[in-house]
Image (cartoon, helix red, strand yellow):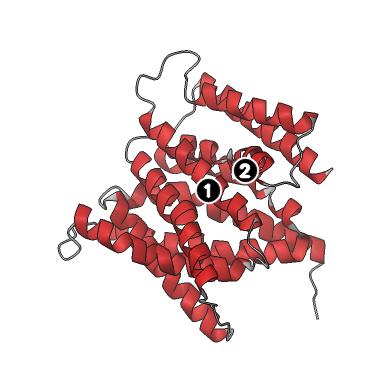
Amino acid sequence: MFKIKRSTLSFVMLFLLGIIWGSSFLFIKYTVLSLKPVTAVFLRMIVAALCLFIYTKIKSIQIPIKKKDIINYITIAILGNVFPFFLVSWAEVSINTNVTGIIMGLMPITTVFLAYFFVKEEKINIYTFIGIFLGFLGLFFLLEIITNKNNNSLPEIAVVIGTISFAIATVYTRKIPNFNPLYILTGSTYFACLILIPFVIFFDDPLNISATNQSIIFAIILGVLNTAIGGLIFFKLIKLSGAAFTSTVNFITPFVAVVWGYIFLQEYLNFNQIVGFIFILIGIYLVKKSTNA
């Protein structure tokens, strides 16, 4: 019987995850063409919740619902799902997917930076410091703050805030005793749906939603592929090869976002954005080098 080497399987899963998550920015763009951002996120989370419910039932996995678990689910639902997903969806109404993907690539740098202040075990060495500096310098170039060419950076700033929110959620998970990724993924997805209901009712008309089939289909794809399947692959890969190896997916997702944006939407990066992209990638590399040392 043909067997795949453990290392080969790890790299296949890593690149598959990078393609899945890197594609999410293109899919989000298609969903918000006719769906309001809050409704697009709600549909995405409902579909993801259904997929995870089916998966846990098939695997006979019982999601704990003690008070401390519920607090963790709600916290991650807000910081890791509702808030960043909405901000990215809202931003992509007006900005390119490649820029969004590159900014979100700052997540590991932001996580390490925040962890230094809130996680006792986190240390910053010279590589980390330079990596963080280059990452944020790249962000300034990406937003074109240095050249003063961008007069309206609000959508990009929204993505930055979403990235910080993701990073806070990641740091928060490090403080959870006996952290179980599948429990958190599933529980937070359930609560994200509940949290979004009043916002959908207030900001949209759920009984009279006008949207193209394309937007609805891509919202469903986001729920199934990018949230549910992507999340499961992510945690399976951590179990198979460790967190350090899995975190290198952050090198792949921005490239995928840029390539898909160019192929499907004819999006281009200008000189300043390319410089910012390079600085961010070098920054991620240095931060990863320091955390793996």
Residue 128: where, in percent of width, then height? 74, 33
Which quarter of the picture shows residue 14?
Answer: bottom right
* Mark 1 and mark 2 residues within 8 Å of each other at the beta carbon: yes
- The residue depicted at 65 percent of the width and 26 percent of the height is 134
Where is 200 relative to 153, above or below? below
Tell me the residue at 57%/86% (across/down): 60
Residue 98, percent from left and from top: 48, 37
Which of the two residues, 271 or 120, is positioned nearer the viewer here?
120
Q: Position of residue 271 (x, y in %)?
A: 53, 19
Residue beneath label 1, please?
166
* Residue 111 visible here: yes
Residue with the most extreme top position:
147
Q: Residue furthest front?
A: 67
Q: Could you tell me which residue is drawn at 65 percent across and 39 percent down? A: 117
Horizontal side of residue 255 vs 220, given as left or right: right
- In the rendered image, the vertical position of residue 114 relative to residue 271, given as above or below: below
Q: Which residue type does callout 2 highlight?
A: Thr
10 horizontally vs 219: left or right: right
Q: Earlier in the sequence, mark 1 or mark 2?
A: 2
Q: Amino acid at mark 1?
A: Phe
Label 2 secondary element: helix
Point out which mark residue 40 bears.
none
- Which residue lies at the image location 65% right of the left edge and 54% below the top edge? 15
- Distance from Cα at disc 1 to Cα at disc 2: 8 Å
Mark 1 element type: helix
Residue at the farthest right position: 293
In this rendering, is residue 230 above or below 98? below
- Circle 2 residue: 111
Residue count near mark 2 (Cα–Cα under 10 Å), binned few <14, some 14–19, many ≥20: some
- Quarter of the image where the N terminus is located: bottom right
